[in-house]
């Protein structure tokens, strides 16, 4: 019998349940994937907690790697026994196996392990979006990366640094600062968890000859939003792609103008890869960046699938450096 993680009401990690879930044969255009590695992402916390409400009862998870073990009619995009990964819905990756539209699956190269694919595909595609669609890296430009030691953060630091960008990372501990500098950041600023970011803009301005950064990549949200805006150079861009600390404040566009003709963007990976052709091309570029060393599949910890609640507790502690995986 197939098993999955489900929850009946929003709340803390304790709402997650290990349940049996019958799995029908794949329908037309579908493939059944036997999971070998499942990625844990902060969007899963948003769904579980109710920050992003979902119909209940619900499964969790968007990212996984595995092997194709059954095909529905009309499928030609993948083959039986093929190693694949995926990164978008519907929710339900926290499962031993599941059926998915075959055109949303991407081949995993022989040079990439299942675990690395599961650790990289969501976070890597997020970083890919941030360095292709959101802003094209300019050698010598300065950027600010919040949560720089996290799963996306470390990939973003490596990718930007490899293209000659001066990265200022923001982390919560000296140990994380060391990891971020090792990943290529020119500087790592420490703001302890729960600490105020009041001094951050002044530190950023001091590091950029008083000008500020071209881009601030902010996945933290409420606690860092104002500091990110205040750290931007004129015509700078705040790319806000997460809300780990809470919802963003309301923004008056006129205020962005008076503060230096600033821009604010809320990019989503799901728009970035909505077209199957775009998905496969972007995934191929992520795996190529992995092969070239522009990014790494840094795995912080692995948990049995039935212990998903423990993985969520660790993720919410913000004590991680890299990806968390669930292993069926």
Image: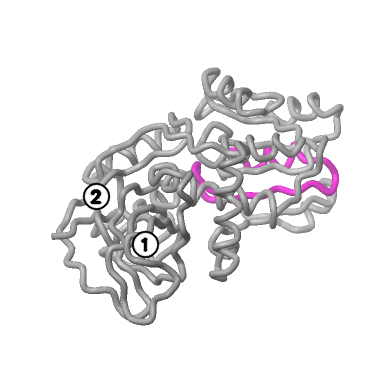
Going by the image, does 174 lie left or right of 212?
A: left
Gap between marks 2 and 1 measured at Cα: 16 Å
Left or right, 186 with respect to 177, comes to right
Local packing at callout 1 (Cα closer than 10 Å; few below 14, some 14-19, many 20+) is some
Q: How many marks?
A: 2
Snapshot quadrant of residue 12: top left
Residue at coordinates 44% horizontally, 38% vertically from top-left? 323
> Is 278 in front, or is 8?
278
Q: Is residue 222 visible?
A: no
Residue 28, percent across and down?
A: 34, 81
* Residue for point 23% across, 56% down: 4
Which residue is label 2 attached to?
Answer: 15
The x and y percentages for residue 174 are: 55, 18
Quarter of the image containing the N terminus?
bottom left
> In this image, 198 relative to 46: left or right?
right
Residue 24, above or below 197: below
Q: Is residue 221 above or below residue 192?
A: below
Q: Tell me the crowding category of disc 2: few under 14, some 14 to 19, or many 20 or more residues within 10 angstroms, Cα based.
A: some
Quadrant of the image occupied by residue 159: top right
Answer whether residue 233 is magenta in the image.
yes
Where is residue 97 shown, x and y percent of the image?
A: 26, 59
- Circle 2 SS class: helix
Q: How is this picture coloured?
A: one colour
Q: Nearer the viewer, residue 95 or 32?
A: 32
Percent across and percent down for residue 223 are 57, 39
Q: Which sits in the foreground, 327 or 59?
A: 327
Circle 1 sits on which residue?
Answer: 91
Q: Which residues are magenta?
A: 223-247
Residue 320: numbered disc: none
**Res. 235 visible in picture:** yes
Q: Is residue 238 part of the magenta span, yes or no?
A: yes
């Amino acid at each position: 019998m197939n098993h999955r993680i489900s929850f009946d009401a929003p709340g803390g990690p304790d709402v997650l349940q290990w349940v049996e879930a019958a799995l029908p044969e794949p329908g037309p255009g579908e493939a059944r994937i036997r999971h070998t590695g499942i990625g844990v992402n902060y969007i899963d916390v948003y769904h579980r907690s109710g920050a992003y409400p979902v119909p209940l009862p619900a499964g969790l998870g968007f990212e996984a790697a595995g092997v194709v073990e059954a095909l529905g009619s009309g499928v030609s995009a993948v083959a039986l026994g093929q190693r694949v990964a995926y990164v978008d819905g519907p929710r339900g990756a926290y499962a031993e196996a599941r059926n998915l539209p075959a055109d949303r699956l991407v081949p995993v190269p022989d040079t990439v392990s299942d675990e690395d694919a599961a650790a990289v595909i969501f976070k890597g595609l997020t970083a890919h979006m941030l360095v292709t669609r959101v802003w094209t890296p300019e050698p010598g430009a300065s950027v600010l990366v919040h949560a720089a030691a996290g799963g996306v953060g470390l990939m973003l630091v490596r990718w930007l640094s490899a293209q000659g960008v001066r990265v200022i990372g923001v982390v919560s501990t000296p140990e994380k600062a060391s990891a971020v500098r090792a990943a290529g950041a020119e500087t790592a600023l420490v703001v302890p968890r729960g600490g105020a970011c009041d001094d951050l803009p002044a530190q950023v301005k001091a590091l950029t000859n008083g000008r500020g950064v071209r881009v601030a990549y902010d996945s933290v949200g409420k606690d860092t939003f104002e500091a990110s805006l205040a750290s931007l150079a004129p015509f700078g861009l705040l790319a806000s792609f997460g809300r780990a600390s809470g919802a963003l404040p309301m923004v008056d566009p006129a205020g962005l103008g008076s503060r230096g003709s600033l821009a604010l963007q809320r990019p989503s990976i799901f728009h970035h890869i909505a077209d199957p052709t775009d998905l496969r091309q972007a995934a191929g570029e992520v795996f190529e960046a992995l092969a070239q060393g522009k990014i790494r599949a840094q795995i912080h910890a692995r948990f049995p699938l039935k212990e998903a609640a423990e993985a969520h507790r660790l993720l919410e502690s913000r004590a991680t450096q890299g990806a968390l995986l669930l292993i069926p």
